[in-house]
Amino acid sequence: MIRLRNISKSYQRPGEGELKVLKDVSFDVERGEFVAIVGSSGSGKSTLMNILGLLDSPDCGEYELAGANVSSLSASELAGIRNSTIGFVFQQFHLLPRTTAIENVELPMVYSNTINGDTRKKAIDALCRVGLEERLTHYSGELSGGQQQRVAIARALINDPDIILADEPTGNLDQDSGRQIMDLFRKLNDAGSTIILITHDPELASQASRRVFIHDGRLSHAEAVMQSDRINMAFVSGSQPQGLSHE
Amino acid sequence: MNRKLLLKNSLRIMFRNKLRTLFMSIGVMIGVGTLIAGQSLGSGAEQQLNQRVNKIFSPGSIMLVSGTLTNADVEAVEQQMEQVVASAARFGGGESEISYQGVNHKAAVFGHTVEGETVWNRSVIEGRYFTNSDMSKTARVALLGHRLSELLFGADGDPIGEEILIASVPFRVIGVLEPAGIDPHGEDRDEDIYIPITTAMRRLNNTEYIGIAKLLVSDLEQVDEDADQVSEILRKEHNIAPGEDEDFAIYSSEFVGRMVVKTNRVLNVYMVAAAGVVLLVAAIVIASIMLVVVRERVAEIGLRKALGATEQNIGFQFLIEVVSVTLVSGLLGVGLGLGAANLVSLFTGMPVIVTTDSIALGLGAAALVGIASGIAPARKAARLDPVEALR
Ligand SMILES: Nc1ncnc2c1ncn2[C@@H]1O[C@H](COP(=O)(O)OP(=O)(O)OP(=O)(O)O)[C@@H](O)[C@H]1O
Ligand SMILES: [Mg+2]
């Protein structure tokens, strides 16, 4: 599904020279996987997600998404893939203000070339999938944080994407709502969705079927995580992730 | 792209910010309103002026004006130019005191010939016009404009056969003139009084000079050339050496028609220029408001891009938002302009002529303002980097 090879990304800072944010990152995700990318603040998680989500392009390296080499694609082709292949879930929800849940979920269909028929009905179906059948015509401001994030997830699902990219989806939520969101992701994964979850919280990450650690722009791959055994991990390579105690 | 959904989306956004949308609309409404009002009143005024001028300067007519014009001059022209099919002298126009049983009124007194009825294009609605016998007898008979008749005899009074005084000379009223309305100089021609030209020249003024004569020519295409020929004949009759100034003036219907159109154009150009300035200001206001809007909606733009919007999609959206506002404003402006024009018409009596051309012009201008002012904000929005916009 996803194949990253030797991806690097750096930012030019005037006066400070080059800031290397991603260093030689290689990474694969299979269809149907639920992968968590874990790392502390500033480690380069969002930068990686922007590249995975085709919002940004790497300085060098190869990125294959669903069999296509994306570095050769034009800006509008990339937009088309974002629309049909990727579903984004952001930490800040990013719902349109003063807009109903249904209309928010309809938004990706505005830019879809393949969707036709009743966009409203599709939006309602997606909202039902995330358990918001009671809040269809509520405005974004009339929803709790957890409900807003569920609207965002419904929006991410609406075009049947191959991958869901979620960057700190529970970062702005209390524990309960966060748990609901994670349950939802697991359910979606059980139903076949490929999910990449980005978080700084190793415990949250442990709910994924696989964890990958990012530290200072480098990835370290860990073996599959058992729910009961969160601390004992065998690192395939690289340094120990930050935030975990030494043993 | 699902345009229906996007349009619904955009219109809702514009409708939500009512105050801001109002600020964007107001200039376009006023500008288009000015344009439409100007065009409608302008066309109306042109038509009205043309009608008034045509009453006197009917197509194919030439007017001779001179303090020393005599009947002999007019006869000479008629004899030498077979294309002159009719002519009629007119005398005077000076004001005199008119009285009837103690009611006094000042009115312009004109001396007319029998031919005047057709050549000057004004007959009677009551009674009879002058006859040859009135002319030869220098009869003391008079025709009244209907307003003057009302002033002297009241609205229901019957003036025919009554005796009135013109500058203390008794005259018998034999008819009421056709309504003529206000002339291009603003005089009410329905307060005029007509008497036989012979009576006016000999009895009242004791003069040989007729003042004005109107000629009708056969070929409407040749009026200017005919006017030149008339001028040459008159120069000979008045013994004017080459290079010397003429003591007469000649106006052709063609010449006057051109003058009318020209004056009206000038008026129209002012209105269009005023509307243009308003619309220009409106475009600048809209563009700056929209630039702020784009800045406010950075996160939305970033989100839309993440969800698959291309640069064109985003640019199109902002352009549509602006153009839909200006077009709706333009429509309201058309209504406003027509309302204003009709209001002016109500008070001034000026006719209003609405053409589809002027409405198309107004809406076209509104759309143009939208596109012109929307392009910069749309480009700015389209080029936003989604990564930065979403941060
Ligand atoms: N446009 C940019 N210009 C310069 N530096 C940048 C830019 N974007 C990110 N960085 C830097 O790159 C590093 C990684 O940023 P990134 O946003 O990927 O971190 P993160 O892992 O998502 O952190 P957080 O958990 O706080 O969201 C940071 O040090 C950040 O300051
Ligand atoms: Mg981040």
Image: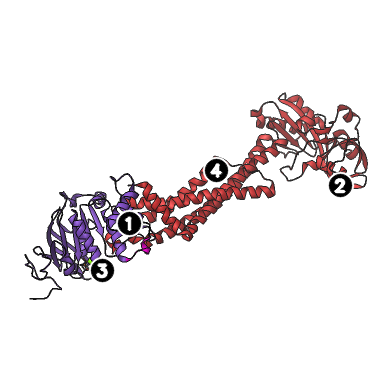
Q: Secondary structure at mark 1?
A: loop
Which chain does tag 4 point to?
B
Residue type indicated by callout 3: Asp
Q: CA distance from mark 3 to mark 1?
A: 20 Å
Residue that sits furthest to the top in the current view: B82
Q: Is mark 2 within 8 Å of ligand 1?
A: no
Q: Secondary structure at mark 4?
A: helix
Residue at label 3? A176
Residue that sits furthest to the front in the current view: A134
Q: Is mark 3 within 8 Å of ligand 1?
A: no
Q: Secondary structure at mark 2?
A: strand
Say which of B180 and B254 sits in front. B180
Q: CA distance from mark 1 to mark 4?
A: 52 Å
Packing grade of label 4 (10 A; few <14, some 14-19, many >=20) is many
> Quadrant of the rendered structure where residue B244 is?
top right
Instruction: Point out the stretch of residues depicted in magenta.
Output: A139-144
Percent coordinates x, y for residue B38 in the rendering: 59, 48
Residue at label 4? B358
Q: How is the image coloured?
A: by chain
Residue at label 2? B105
The lab-note entry on whether marks 1 and 4 share a chain reads no
Packing grade of label 3 (10 A; few <14, some 14-19, many >=20) is few
Chain for colour purple: A
Q: CA distance from mark 1 to mark 2?
A: 88 Å
The lab-note entry on whether marks 2 and 4 share a chain reads yes
Which chain does tag 1 point to?
A
Percent coordinates x, y for residue B137 in the rendering: 91, 30
Residue at label 1? A133
